[in-house]
Image (cartoon, rainbow, N blue to C red):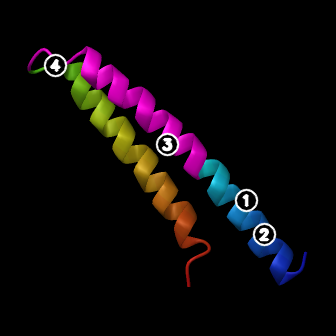
């Protein structure tokens, strides 16, 4: 593959990861809203999940950011 093909593939991957991350975050936010009754382990789990998705998206972005 050429450099431009590699870059195009990387950007496509980033777009896919971004869309998936946004969807996952919206799902987790809905869980948080539904479970917001106080000190709930489900909220801690949702936060951890969102942080994981964010880290994965950041790692993907780093692949195409100079």
Q: Which residue is mark 1?
A: 12
| Range drawn in magenta | 18-38
Task: Calculate the distance from the C-alpha at mark 3 to the C-alpha at mark 2.
Answer: 21 Å
Q: Is residue 38 above or below residue 8?
A: above
Q: Earlier in the sequence, mark 4 or mark 3?
A: 3
Residue 1 placement (x, y as % from top left): 91, 75
Name which of mark 4 and mark 1 comes first in the sequence.
1
Residue contact between numbered discs 3 and 1, judged by CB atoms under 8 Å: no
Above-or-below relation of 49 to 16? above
Could you tell me which secondary element the residue under label 1 belongs to?
A: helix
Give the foreground label among 4 and 1.
Answer: 1
Figure check: 15 above or below 7: above
Give how far across and how far down residue 52 sits, in percent: 41, 45
Q: What separation in Å lies between label 4 and label 3 (alpha carbons)?
A: 23 Å
Measured in 3D between alpha carbons, the distance from the residue under mark 4 to the one under mark 1, in whole angstroms, is 37 Å
Is disc 2 surrounded by few (<14), some (14 to 19) or many (20+) residues within 10 Å? few
Residue where numbered disc 4 is placed: 40
Disc 3 element: helix
Question: On the rendered structure, is 15 left or right of 29?
Answer: right
Marks 3,2: beta carbons within 8 A: no
Q: Which residue in the structure is indicated by mark 2? A: 8
Residue 5 inside the magenta-drawn segment:
no
Query: Could you say which disc has been placed on residue 22 in the image?
Result: 3
Q: Quadrant of the C terminus?
A: bottom right
**Number of numbered markers:** 4
Marks 4 and 2 sit apart, C-alpha to C-alpha, by 42 Å
| Marks 2 & 1, CB-CB < 8 Å contact | yes
SS at circle 2: helix
Q: Residue at x 33, y 21 (%)?
A: 31
User: Label 2 to label 1, Cα distance in Å?
Assistant: 6 Å
Q: Sequence-wise, which precedes: disc 3 or disc 1?
A: 1
On the image, which quarter does residue 20 sit in?
Answer: top right
């Amino acid at each position: 593959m050429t450099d431009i093909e590699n870059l195009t593939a990387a950007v496509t991957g980033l777009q896919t990861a971004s869309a998936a991350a946004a969807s996952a975050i919206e799902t987790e936010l809905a869980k948080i809203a539904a479970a917001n009754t106080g000190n709930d382990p489900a909220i801690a789990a949702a936060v951890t999940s969102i942080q994981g998705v964010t880290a994965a998206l950041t790692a993907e972005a780093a692949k195409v950011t100079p």
